[in-house]
């Protein structure tokens, strides 16, 4: 499909065929190799799957409409333990496709060494980008996606892991009762997955020290005026996306309104559109919100 003149196609079709150039994949591979705390074999598999999925809309459609896919997702909705496995695999594939390291580097540029940081739903995407001496606490809902202390210590010796917690940011008082204790909270691609977003952002506000920063990154809605076709298709596919991802509302909520009404200064947050990413993951809201 790479021989197609991509300019002839509407953005949405072009996105699928053109999203993962060889160059992108090379840099993705390089990034995974240097930041992931998983084995080389797993990384290779992730990269191959990501490349294959993002280049082959027909493969995706075929899998979705094959007899197997729907029973698996339905089971994942009804069985929490199976759902955890399903979600863990799905998230690994999605995160390999996202490849948003440039945004992350920009996001983390404001970090100073030796800060107390809480990362919500961390996986391993940010660890390689944190400054020396960062004192990390991580909070993850799915125990299968927990980071491993010994692997992190081996790969990122400059980071201090203070706590690795299993828990829900919505009800985090049980594991983190004390407020005003973090300089920074990192929350990338997580709020879209949270059921009660209001409660979660309130909790993050409580946990931050005065003037503490919320480093936020998430996929949001397309601009109706700039990309009407993508906007409406995103709306149309949203229920399907939620079903397949067990409730993720990427592109389906107003991140700016959510953060600003919970007493954060949002002047450091902005929208960006990246047409090198696959549809519907092209519109981001990201930056640093300051606790007021
Ligand atoms: C899409 S992944 C993002 C991973 C990583 N932050 C990144 O940017 O690549 C979302 C992660 O947030 C976790 N998560 C979802 N809801 C959560 C909640 N309520 N509390 C804590 N973690 C949550 C998920 O289990 C998953 O690991």
Image (cartoon, rainbow, N blue to C red):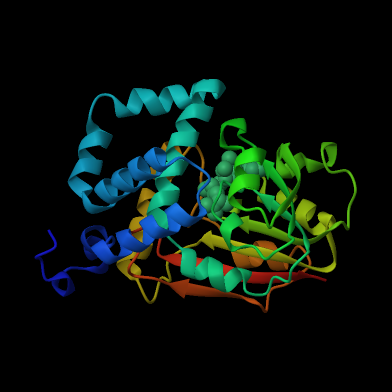
When the figure is inspected, residue 19 is found, relative to residue 272, above or below; the finding is above
Residue at (33, 28) in percent of width and height: 70
**Residue farthest bottom in this picture:** 267
Residue at the image point whose x is 77% and y is 40% from the top:
171
Q: With respect to residue 88, does 104 lie above or below? A: below
In the displayed image of the protein, which residue is found farthest to the left?
Answer: 3
x, y percentage for residue 82?
49, 22
The residue nearer to you, when weighing 214 against 254, is 214
Nearer to the camera, 86 or 92: 92
Question: Which residue is at 39% across, 76% downward?
Answer: 225
Ligand 1's image quarter is: top right
Q: Is residue 131 above or below residue 190?
A: below
Is residue 60 in view from this perspective?
A: yes
Quadrant, the N terminus: bottom left
Image spot of residue 261 (x, y percent): 73, 65
The answer to whether residue 193 of the structure is visible from this angle is no
Query: Splitting the image into 4 quarters, where does residue 254 fall?
Result: bottom right
Percent of width and height locating residue 20: 28, 60
Q: How many marks?
A: 0
In the rendered view, tell whether residue 72 sits above or below residue 238.
above
In the rendered image, which quarter contains the C terminus?
A: bottom right
Left or right of 148? Residue 26 is left
Q: Position of residue 57 (x, y in %)?
A: 22, 49
């Amino acid at each position: 499909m790479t021989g197609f003149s991509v300019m002839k196609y509407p953005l949405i079709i072009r996105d699928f065929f053109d999203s993962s150039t060889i160059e992108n994949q090379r840099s993705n591979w390089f990034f995974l190799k240097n930041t992931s705390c998983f084995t080389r074999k797993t990384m290779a598999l992730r990269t191959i799957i990501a490349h294959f999925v993002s280049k082959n809309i027909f493969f995706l459609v075929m899998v979705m409409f094959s007899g197997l896919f729907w029973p698996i997702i339905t089971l994942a909705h009804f069985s929490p333990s199976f759902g955890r496995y399903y979600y863990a695999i799905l998230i690994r594939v999605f995160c390999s496709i996202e490849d948003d390291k440039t945004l992350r580097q920009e996001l983390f540029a404001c970090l100073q060494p030796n800060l107390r940081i809480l990362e919500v739903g961390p996986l391993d995407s940010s660890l390689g980008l944190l400054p020396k001496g960062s004192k990390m606490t991580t909070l993850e809902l799915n125990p299968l996606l927990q980071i491993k202390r010994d692997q992190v210590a081996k790969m990122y010796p400059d980071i201090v892991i203070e706590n690795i917690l299993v828990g829900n940011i919505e009800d985090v008082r049980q594991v983190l009762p004390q407020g005003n204790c973090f300089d920074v909270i990192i929350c990338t691609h997580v709020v879209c997955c949270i059921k009660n977003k209001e409660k979660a952002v309130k909790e993050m506000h409580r946990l931050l020290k005065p003037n503490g920063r919320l480093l936020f990154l998430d996929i949001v809605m397309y601009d109706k005026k700039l990309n009407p076709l993508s906007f409406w298709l995103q709306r149309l596919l949203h229920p399907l996306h939620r079903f397949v991802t067990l409730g993720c509302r990427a592109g389906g909520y107003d991140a700016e309104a959510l953060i600003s009404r919970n007493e954060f200064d949002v002047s450091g947050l902005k929208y960006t559109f990246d047409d090198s990413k696959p549809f519907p993951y092209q519109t981001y809201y990201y930056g640093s919100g300051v606790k007021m």
